[in-house]
Structure formats: C-alpha cells, structure tokens
Image (tube, rainbow, N blue to C red):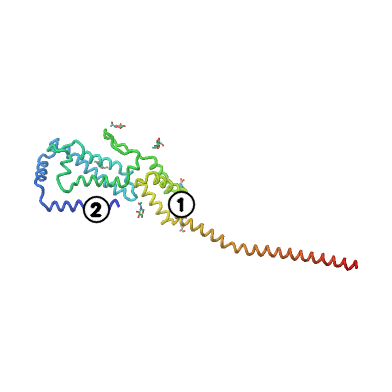
C-alpha cells in the first residue's frame, strides 16, 4: 500500500513536471533562478530559506527511504519516527516559520506559490498523509521536537506491552516449529494473549497504530494459513468429539440393555425355578398330608 502510494505520488510529479517543462517557463521564475544562481548562496538572507529547503529535501528523502525499508512488515511508526519528526519540522518551518528568501519574501511564498506543481507542498503532504494514515501517533505517548530542538520520543505503554506479547509469540513459534511440535497447542496461550490485548485496544480507541495492526494481521494469517490452527479447527474438534460420543451411544446402549435384560431373565428364571420348587414342595407336602 505504502509503496503504491509513493509510486502514484512520484508519477504524478513526473507528469506535471513534463507538462511544465514542455510549456513555457514562467519568466519571473526564470529570472529568480538566474538571480539566485548569480548570488551563489552568498547572501545570508537568501540562504536562510534555501538552507531550510535543502534540509527538508534531505529529511524527506531520509523518511521516504526509511518508510520503504520498514514497509513489510510495517514498522514505520516506531522505526521512522525520528525521520518523520525532522522532515515535518523543516516542512512546518518552511510553511509557517520566519526564514525569508533573497527577495525578503517569506519562505512559504518563495516555495509554494511560484509554480503549478508545488513540489515542496506535495512532498510535505505526502509525508504527513503517510504518517497520519498509519495512525502512527497512537504508538507514542509523546513524539515531538521541543523548542530547543531536541527530539522527545516516548513509546506508549500499550505499544511496549504489545511488543512484548508479539515477541513471545514469535519466540514460541520458532521454538515449537524448530522442535517439530504443534504450534496450535504450544502457542495457544501466547496467541490468545496477543489477540486479547488487540481486541481491548480496538475497543478502547478504534484507531490503532499500523505497526500493531500489521503485526496482529500477520500473526493471524500465520496461525490460520501456515499452521492451520484457527478457532474453526477447534470447533471441528468439538463437533467430532460430540459426534463420536453420540455414535458410541447405541454401541454402549444395546449391549448394556442386553446384559441388563439377560440378567433380569436369569433372575426371572431363578425366581421361576424357586417358585416351581416351592410349588412342588407345597404340592408334595399336600399330597403327603392327604
Ligand atoms: C539523513 O540521514 C543521514 C543518515 O542517517 C543523517 O546523517 C542525516 O543527518 C539525515 N538528514 C536529515 C536532514 O535529517
Ligand atoms: C532541551 O529541553 C529538554 C526539555 O524540554 C531538556 O531535557 C534538554 O536537556 C534540553 N536540551 C538542550 C540541549 O538544552
Ligand atoms: C507507563 O508505565 C510507566 C512505568 O511502568 C509508568 O510510570 C507510567 O505512568 C505509565 N504511563 C501510563 C500513561 O500509563
Ligand atoms: C524458547 O527456547 C529458548 C532456548 O532455546 C528458551 O530460553 C525459551 O524459554 C523458549 N521459549 C518458549 C516460549 O518456549
Ligand atoms: C521434523 O519432522 C520431519 C518429518 O515429519 C522430519 O523429516 C524432520 O527430521 C523432523 N525434524 C526434527 C528437528 O525433529
Ligand atoms: C491483512 O492481511 C491481508 C492479506 O495478507 C490483507 O489483504 C489485509 O488487507 C490485511 N489487513 C489489514 C488490516 O492490514
């Protein structure tokens, strides 16, 4: 998803640039470029805005590189937070800060409103969209650049807790598969704990940082597709057990009935024999009496 968005963004820039290069260059822009080349960055006024644009270019490249490297599995929130904060900080300074260009225009006017492409704005928006679409701020208690320029990044407790459960799950999977044991039964506890925390988070906020969403999604995929131990399988097992019990009922019932009835029959026979002997005895005694 991330790589696709970036691809779209780059091809958009490419197309727009082509259109503009083929069209007539804005005379004023051309003059600006010439003038700025002539000054060669020696003017302190000019270099103020230009230096920020240089820095932004580098920081945006750093963030883009990082986001692609950590796109699969998605880890951009936790792995690229520093790059994001720096890039966004330069971008915000260009948009709202005090630096001015060599004509003493605010940096914003010098970069944003001179052409149809708005490359700087496109890039800044792209970076912020990626960060916000991933709900990255939800991973952190705090992620900002303080007034004195130091980075303050504190990962939230639930992210740390989640990371620990995810690590437990991976360790268990690794241990059991390398030992040829069943992941389904050995890692059931770890799997349940991970899912439970995720469900709790989803219930609390609904907006979960993408690092966590992706890790859960991948774990669930492995659980059901690779190890084939989804909940449904457990249902199957229950159904099979119940079916076997029901199937066994006649097998147990008829012999039980047979044994019981044959026991009754022998009892009856014995009773009858007993009765008969008593009758004979009585008859005998009667006959002897008469
Ligand atoms: C970009 O990344 C490089 C290498 O990590 C680092 O040295 C440099 O300071 C970064 N640039 C900015 C503007 O953050
Ligand atoms: C910047 O401010 C933070 C607190 O906001 C402080 O901990 C840190 O030491 C400061 N750094 C410098 C270089 O002054
Ligand atoms: C996070 O955990 C730390 C230490 O375990 C604790 O001091 C802090 O209050 C917790 N923060 C929140 C928001 O629960
Ligand atoms: C996995 O194996 C390592 C050593 O081989 C052991 O220290 C660890 O406790 C095991 N973890 C689990 C979840 O079985
Ligand atoms: C795991 O089982 C497979 C076949 O079921 C066997 O070929 C393999 O040697 C076993 N590996 C271990 C470590 O026991
Ligand atoms: C989970 O993974 C599947 C396939 O791997 C993908 O189609 C789906 O979009 C993912 N869901 C989320 C929320 O990332």
- The C terminus is located in which quarter? bottom right
215 above or below 281? above
Asked if the residue at label 1 sits under 8 Å from ligand 4, the reply is: yes
Residue extending farthest to the front is 290
| Identity of the residue drawn at 39% across and 40% down | 157
Near mark 1 (Cα within 10 A), the count class, few <14, some 14-19 or many ≥20, is: some
118 above or below 267? above
Q: Which mark is residue 32?
A: none
239 above or below 39? below
Question: How far across and down, in percent of the image, does residue 256 sit?
Answer: 65, 62
Q: Nearer the viewer, residue 235 or 10?
A: 235
Mark 2, mark 1: which one is toward the viewer?
2
Quadrant in the picture for residue 277: bottom right
Question: How far across and down, in percent of the image, does residue 212 sit?
Answer: 37, 47
Q: In the shown orientation, is residue 204 left or right of residue 102?
A: right
Q: Which mark is residue 176?
A: 1
Mark 1 secondary-structure assignment: helix
| Identity of the residue drawn at 51% across and 57% down | 238
Quadrant in the picture for residue 269: bottom right
Q: Which mark is residue 8?
A: 2
N-terminal-most mark, 2 or 1: 2
Q: Nearer the viewer, residue 11 or 169?
A: 11
């Amino acid at each position: 998803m991330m790589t696709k968005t970036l691809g779209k963004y780059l091809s958009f820039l490419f197309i727009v640039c082509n259109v503009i290069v083929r069209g007539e260059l804005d005379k004023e822009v051309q003059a600006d470029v010439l003038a700025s080349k002539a000054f060669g960055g020696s003017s302190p006024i000019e270099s103020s805005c230009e230096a920020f644009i240089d820095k932004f270019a580098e920081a945006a490249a750093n963030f883009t590189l990082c986001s692609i490297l950590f796109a699969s599995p998605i880890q951009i929130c936790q792995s690229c937070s520093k790059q994001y904060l720096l890039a966004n900080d330069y971008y915000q300074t260009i948009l709202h800060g005090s630096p001015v260009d060599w004509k003493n225009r605010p940096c914003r006017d010098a970069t944003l409103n001179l052409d149809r492409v708005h490359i700087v704005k496109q890039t800044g928006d792209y970076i912020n969209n990626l960060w916000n679409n991933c709900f990255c701020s939800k991973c952190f208690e705090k992620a900002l650049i303080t007034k004195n320029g130091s980075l303050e990044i504190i990962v939230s407790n639930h992210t740390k807790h989640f990371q620990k459960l995810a690590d437990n799950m991976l360790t268990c999977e690794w241990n059991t598969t390398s030992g040829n044991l069943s992941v389904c039964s050995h890692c059931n506890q770890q799997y349940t704990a991970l899912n439970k925390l995720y469900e709790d988070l989803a219930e609390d906020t609904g907006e979960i940082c993408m690092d966590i969403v992706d890790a859960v999604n991948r774990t669930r995929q492995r659980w059901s597709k690779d190890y084939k131990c989804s909940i449904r399988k457990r249902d199957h097992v229950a159904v099979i057990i119940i079916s076997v019990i029901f199937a066994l009922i006649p097998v147990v019932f008829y012999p039980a009935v047979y044994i019981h009835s044959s026991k009754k029959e022998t009892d009856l026979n014995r009773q009858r024999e007993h009765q008969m002997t008593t009758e004979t005895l009585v008859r005998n005694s009667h006959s002897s009496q008469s």
